[in-house]
Image (cartoon, rainbow, N blue to C red):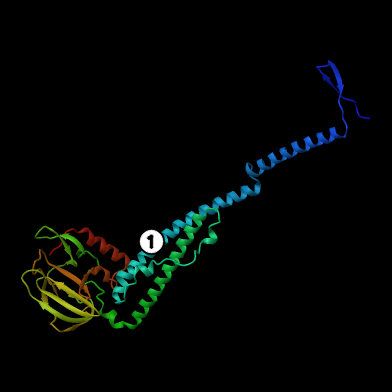
Amino acid sequence: MSKVKFRYNPDTLSYDKIETGFKYYVSRFFIHFVFSGLLGLVYFFAYTYLIDSPKEKRLIRENARLTTQYEILGKRLDETVKVLDDIQRRDENIYRVIFQADSIPNSIRKAGFGGVNRYAPLEDLDNSELVISTAKKLDVIMKQAYVQSKSFDEIVELAKRNEDLLKCTPAIMPISNKDLKRTASGWGYRIHPIYKTRKFHSGMDFTAPTGTDIYATGDGKVSKITREKTGYGNRIEIDHGFGFKTLYAHMDAFNVKKGQKVKRGDVIGFVGNTGTSTAPHLHYEVHVKDKKVNPSHYYFNDLTAEEYEEMISISSNSNQTFD
């Protein structure tokens, strides 16, 4: 038998009996049930949104590692883009010029991807911007590498079919210069030695004693021999065919005649100090399709990569020419 409970009534100054029937217990149960439910919800939301579970902590650490890896990958892709850009510049300015191949326009090399958004499945991922950015870089590199690969395939085919072209290409230095100390002044703006004004130097100067041998830099035919008291002085021009011509100026004497065929390495004349010149030297030019180009791009037959870099450094340090 349950205990009888009373409650003090201040109005009547007496104790009233508390009814503890079925309704009482139902109401008490309902109150406890609602309170327990609310308390459970508070714990649930606190655990779900405020406290990380071991699995969530593991996922957070893994996500942080993946983010770092994507950032590192992005930097490496940027470095790869720079290397690929350098290869493309060499392809356009050296290889395709040498083999007389048409230039590949940037609209093809740098073309994007049209049509459907290929990155839509990545937009729902965490750090989607980083992931999509990395994917875009990779796609661009793959496409540019494909275009470059096809370009090299074309160059290889041209090389196989153009043995004569290789022989005619001006591919050596015009004087013996193994130690590179005779490299005096290179392509670009220089101070004119006589007029002391800034002037574009469209060739390369090589210092050497008067009488030093001058070599034909590729197979060809002597197209012009000129003797002048100013300007280039005594000079020879060789037409190599395939759009290539070379010019040798300020010579002391000639060893060939106009119309004579020469081969790469033949002695065509000797270093001098004729024309507008301040010291014995050879002024050497390379023309491609009647346009003057930097001769240093064509010394690939007798210089290693290290020697080429040293030659460029030496010729760039000089800010004055000899003619």
Residue 10 shown left or right of residue 52 in the figure: right
User: 30 or 82, which lies in front?
Assistant: 30
Please identify the quadrant where the N terminus is shown.
Answer: top right
Direction left: furthest residue: 229
Residue at the image point whose x is 44% and y is 60% from the top = 77
Residue marked by disc 1:
82
User: 8 or 322, which lies in front?
Assistant: 8
User: 25 or 89, which lies in front?
Assistant: 25
The percent coordinates of residue 282 (x first, y second) are: 15, 69
Residue at the image point whose x is 23% and y is 71% from the top = 173
Q: Is residue 323 above or below residue 100?
A: above
Q: Total of numbered circles in the picture?
A: 1
Crowding around mark 1 (Cα neighbors within 10 Å: few <14, some 14 to 19, many 20+) is few
Residue 241 shown left or right of residue 49 in the figure: left
Q: For the residue labelled by badge 1, is the local secondary structure a helix, a strand or a loop?
A: helix
Residue 277 shown left or right of residue 90 in the figure: left
The percent coordinates of residue 312 (x first, y second) are: 26, 63
Could you say which quadrant of the image residue 167 lies in? bottom left
Direction top: furthest residue: 13
Tell me if residue 289 can be seen.
Answer: yes
The percent coordinates of residue 205 (x first, y second) are: 18, 66
The percent coordinates of residue 309 (x first, y second) are: 29, 63
Direction right: furthest residue: 1
Could you say which quadrant of the image residue 275 lies in? bottom left
Q: Is residue 1 above or below residue 139?
A: above
User: 28 or 107, which lies in front?
Assistant: 28
Residue at the image point whose x is 36% and y is 67% from the top = 87
Please identify the quadrant where the C terminus is shown.
Answer: bottom left
Residue type at mark 1?
Lys
Tell me if residue 176 can be seen.
Answer: no
Residue at the image point whose x is 81% and y is 34% from the top = 27
